[in-house]
Amino acid sequence: MITDGKLLVGASCSPDSWNGNTLLVGRIVELFYADEVDDPHSVELALSICEGCPVVDRCLDAGIDEEYGVWGGTTAEERITIRKGRRAAKRRA
Ligand code: SF4
């Protein structure tokens, strides 16, 4: 997540974890929950932040079923594809 222009790595981007800092929550929600069609620039920025995040794998595991937002370096559309791939792999196993 970003605060005062600095990237804080290792922090969860979940709004629940920002200790009631409503200004920060608002900024992060705008970025990580931006609409992929209406605001692709914010989505790209959020994804670029994920690239340097040390908890990206854990975050993707936690957010794999989330319908909205950027989680673990993926968009909602990308997670649909990942879920389908995982289900197909399970069927083949
Ligand atoms: S992977 Fe992305 S969304 Fe998840 S905690 Fe890291 S920066 Fe936030």
Image (cartoon, rainbow, N blue to C red):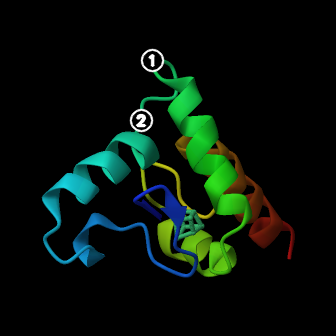
Q: Quadrant of the C terminus?
A: bottom right
> How many numbered markers are drawn?
2
Q: Amino acid at mark 1?
A: Asp
Q: Secondary structure at mark 2?
A: loop
Q: CA distance from mark 2 to mark 1?
A: 8 Å
Q: Is residue 31 above or below residue 2?
A: above
Which of these two is toward me, 77 or 56?
A: 56
Ligand 1 falls in quadrant:
bottom right
Tell whether 6 sits left or right of 20. Answer: right
Where residue 63 appears, as percent x and y from the top left, is: 49, 66
Mark carried by residue 29: none
- In the rendered structure, the answer to whether residue 19 lies left or right of residue 59 reads left
Q: Is residue 32 visible?
A: yes
x and y percent of residue 34 in the render?
A: 41, 35
Q: Residue at x 47, y 78 (%)?
A: 11
Question: Which residue lies under the disc numbered 1?
Answer: 38
Q: On screen, 88 above or below 60?
A: above
Q: Where does residue 78 sit, x and y in percent of width and height?
A: 66, 45
Instruction: Identify the residue at image location x=51%, y=19%.
Output: 37
Q: Foreground residue, 54 or 7?
A: 7
Question: Mark 2 touching mark 1, by CB under 8 A?
Answer: yes
Q: Secondary structure at mark 1?
A: loop
- Circle 2 residue: 34
- Packing grade of label 1 (10 A; few <14, some 14-19, many >=20) is few
Q: Is residue 74 visible?
A: no
Image location (x, y in percent) of residue 21: 17, 66
Task: Say few, some or many: other residues with alpha carbon within 10 Å of mark 2 (under 14 / 14 to 19 / 20 or more).
Answer: many
Residue lying furthest right: 92
- On whether ligand 1 comes within 8 Å of the CB at mark 1, the answer is no
